[in-house]
Image (spheres, rainbow, N blue to C red):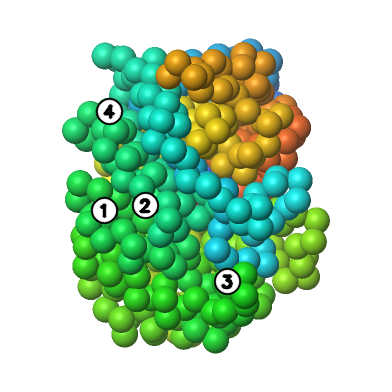
Amino acid sequence: MRISDYTIFVDLNQHSKGSQLLIHGYSGAFDLVPTELATTMKVLAGVSLTGDTLRDALGEGHIEVLKRRGYLTEWGPEEERAFFLRYIRQFHSYTKGNAPHFMIVPAYECNLRCPYCYQEDPGARHLQAKKGFELPDEATMRRVLDGVQALAREFTTERTRSHPSVTFYGGEPLLAKHRPIVEMCLEVLRFEPKVEFRAISNGTELDAYAGLLGPGGIQELQITLDGAASIHNRRRVTGKGEGTFDRIVKNVSFALQEGARINLRVNVDRSNLDSLPSLAVEIRRLGWCESTGFSAYLAPVQSNKNDTNQAMLLETRRFHASIEELGREHPDMGLFHFPNVGLKNQLLRLLQSGSDPAQSIFKPTFCGAHTVMFIIDFSGAIYACMERTNEPSARIGQLLPDGQFELFEGMLEYWRNRSVATTAPCSTCSYALFCGGGCAVKQPDTAGHCDDFQYRFDQAAADAWGDFSRGERASSWEGHSC
């Protein structure tokens, strides 16, 4: 008998003195235990325990409970790892049974020139506005949308869980001149009554979509503001260098009035960190928080290209510490969510419901690129990853002239087979099923991309336990993976 390699020990700090939280990485158990017991278990990690030694170390009354909850195992390290890998592979196969999610790219051009945009990378060949843009003719649009429907039929069966969804993506998908494409997509891609349409947009030309937003149309929008007007207007600018704050604010208000849900994103680095309280005050003044369809979240700017100003980026732990510090000084900052908040909410709901973590928080992969996401442009190219679109070498398939499709087996397997079972450090990590292995683009080999996840998880778990013990309820916000 030995302590399971997938046991997580969380110091509860000020939330519960004299106790620690045990969490198990594949049984999903959460248990409050005396600090003395947790300390003993840490010391015994890796030690084979039998008979009197086991009883003397852990206490007769604890052994059966620890075994039942997964913290004690009779498997050796290799046997336990083999079980963990089998579990992940089965779980990954199960998640591939979810309904497909389609991202439709009307065009790769964008009317903004944000300095941190990963799509500015010349190697990705995005933002092709200088080459001009021709709207696909109706026959081309019909052919491509027929192919999307063929994909939907292939990957949606009677056993499929959830419902298909469609997100418009770019470039900037909701430019005014793209409306005919978007309108046809809304008309044709109604695979079933419950299909939901969303868009990731900069919001600058949203007023051109009157009648297409809200129930029955594009129901949810992710739109970005990067600080108070003076800061935003230096970061999210047009090709002529013009600011866009007032235009976006007007269109967010318009979309909320149309009944659309708004996820307001703020990309944060050192250059706009101090402006966040002013933006929070402005958001409250605009009355957006009074809408049940509005939420706002903060996301650290990532290094996605060689010329990113590295000195301006906030390392993950520093990002969270800075936001929490601003929150203590400026109460209005409470309207912003950020990744740790989403993780804490998920853990708090799990504690409150006692539900199976496999159904609520465990994930064998990091994002939809490894399960059911199909990204399609009007050349008919099919991709798996949002950050690898318009790269011919990254295509996982192609829509065909007859309205059918071809999937490229090698590239499809490259994306769809990645999980925490295939990234070497993840297969022995107790946090793996909470993390999902990290972004394959940021760490494309088999090493995984931890992004300080262990620290963030322990902090979120301690805070979730604190809220749980005080009877507080979780908010509905769960965060965004990309």
Amino acid type, mark 2: Arg
Asked whether residue 264 is in view, the answer is no
Secondary structure category for the residue under label 3: loop
Residue beneath label 3, please?
Answer: 238
Report if the CB atoms under discs 3 and 2 are less than 8 Å apart.
no
Residue beneath label 1, please?
Answer: 212
Report if the CB atoms under discs 3 and 1 are less than 8 Å apart.
no
Q: Earlier in the sequence, mark 1 or mark 2?
A: 2
Report, in whole angstroms, how far the alpha carbon at label 3 lies from the one at label 2.
20 Å
Q: Earlier in the sequence, mark 4 or mark 3?
A: 4
Q: Which mark is residue 179?
A: 2
User: Residue 373 vs residue 57: left or right?
Assistant: left
Secondary structure category for the residue under label 2: helix
Report if the CB atoms under discs 1 and 4 are less than 8 Å apart.
no
Front residue (pair 334, 265): 265
Residue 335 x %, y %: 37, 72
| Quarter of the view holding residue 164 | top left
Report, in whole angstroms, how far the alpha carbon at label 4 lies from the one at label 3.
36 Å
User: Residue 245 vs residue 194: left or right?
Assistant: right
Report, in whole angstroms, how far the alpha carbon at label 3 lies from the one at label 1.
25 Å
User: Residue 432 vs residue 165: left or right?
Assistant: right
Give above or below for 210 relative to 417: below
Q: Earlier in the sequence, mark 1 or mark 4?
A: 4
Amino acid type, mark 4: Phe
Question: Closer to us: mark 1 or mark 4?
Answer: 1
The local crowd at label 4, few if under 14, some if 14 to 19, many if 20 or more residues have their Cα within 10 Å, is some
Amino acid type, mark 3: Thr
